[in-house]
Image (spheres, grey):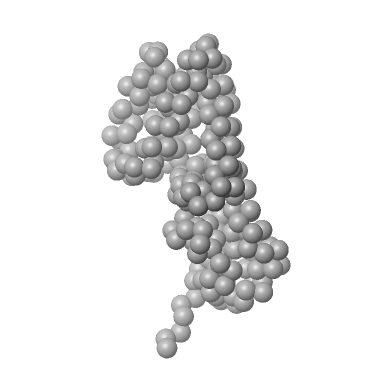
């Protein structure tokens, strides 16, 4: 049997040197590989032995960082909440001069993959289809995200009913956009930004805010 190739372990911090061979892995390395498996293979494949094999380490090192598999799964859910729900809430609350700027703050979460992990989001949603407790956490996250978007509209003088309806249209459309895995060039997507803002807000878009947003997106180097 050919020797197994030694993987270069992913690190969230690109400034850190990758870990290879028999160097002891970190808690982040366990979480990173567990996230990759959750996203690509589903929660059923997030197993201690499977992860240890992919990291080329003994599974005993797992217990330096986690009590058991459930503890690891809880950590993944905490990461999901921090990476996605908290980011949306924070961006909805960013200062903005008008609703166009506020919407652009919201949109950047779904354009910049470093801010919102769509793969992780839909992996957790798939997991929730088989686990009522996870479904409850997903429902709670959606309520928190929607509340943030509603408040974003309320800041710009939309009444409660209107803000709630517009928030739902905006948020559910954005999730659907990712669920359908829409394939389009970023330039094409950005060309629709003005009409999108018009449709979501019912107000004339701020062209300066749109140009600033498109300029920012261009610095991200997205296809």
Quadrant for the N terminus in the image? bottom left
Most distant residue in the bottom direction: 1
| Identity of the residue drawn at 48% across and 24% down | 167
Compared with 82, 88 (above or below) is: above
Picture quadrant of residue 197: top left
> Which of the pair 218/169 is nearer the observer?
169
Q: Is residue 194 visible?
A: no
> Which of the pair 221/189 is nearer the observer?
189
| Identity of the residue drawn at 66% across and 71% down | 61
Horizontal side, residue 120 vs residue 194: left or right: right
Tell me residue 216's x, y (percent).
43, 33
Q: Is residue 68 visible?
A: yes
> Which of the pair 128/115 is nearer the observer?
128
Compared with 119, 86 (above or below) is: above
Tell me residue 212's x, y (percent).
42, 26
Tell me residue 101's x, y (percent).
47, 22
Count up the numbered dots. 0
Quadrant for the C terminus in the image? top left
Tell me residue 26's x, y (percent).
64, 64
Picture quadrant of residue 30: bottom right
| Identity of the residue drawn at 42% across and 26% down | 169
Compared with 87, 63 (above or below) is: below
| Identity of the residue drawn at 55% across and 42% down | 138
């Amino acid at each position: 049997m050919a020797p197994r190739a030694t993987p270069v372990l992913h690190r969230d911090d690109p400034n850190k040197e990758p870990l290879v061979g028999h160097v002891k892995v970190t808690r982040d390395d366990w979480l990173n590989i567990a996230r990759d498996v959750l996203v690509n293979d589903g929660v059923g494949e997030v197993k201690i032995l499977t992860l240890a094999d992919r990291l080329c380490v003994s599974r005993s090192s797992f217990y330096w960082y986690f009590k058991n598999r459930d503890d690891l799964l809880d950590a993944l859910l905490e990461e999901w909440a921090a990476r996605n729900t908290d980011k949306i809430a924070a961006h909805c609350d960013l200062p903005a001069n008008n609703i166009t700027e506020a919407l652009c703050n919201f949109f950047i979460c779904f354009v910049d993959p470093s801010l919102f992990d769509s793969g992780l989001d839909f992996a957790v949603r798939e997991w929730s289809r088989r686990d009522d407790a996870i479904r409850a956490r997903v429902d709670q996250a959606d309520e928190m995200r929607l509340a943030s978007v509603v408040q974003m509209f309320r800041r710009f003088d939309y009444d409660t009913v209107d803000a709630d309806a517009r928030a739902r249209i905006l948020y559910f459309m954005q999730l659907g956009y990712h669920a359908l895995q829409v394939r389009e060039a970023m330039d094409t997507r950005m060309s629709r930004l003005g009409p999108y803002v018009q449709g979501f807000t019912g107000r004339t878009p701020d062209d300066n805010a749109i140009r600033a947003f498109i300029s920012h997106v261009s610095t991200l180097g997205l296809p």
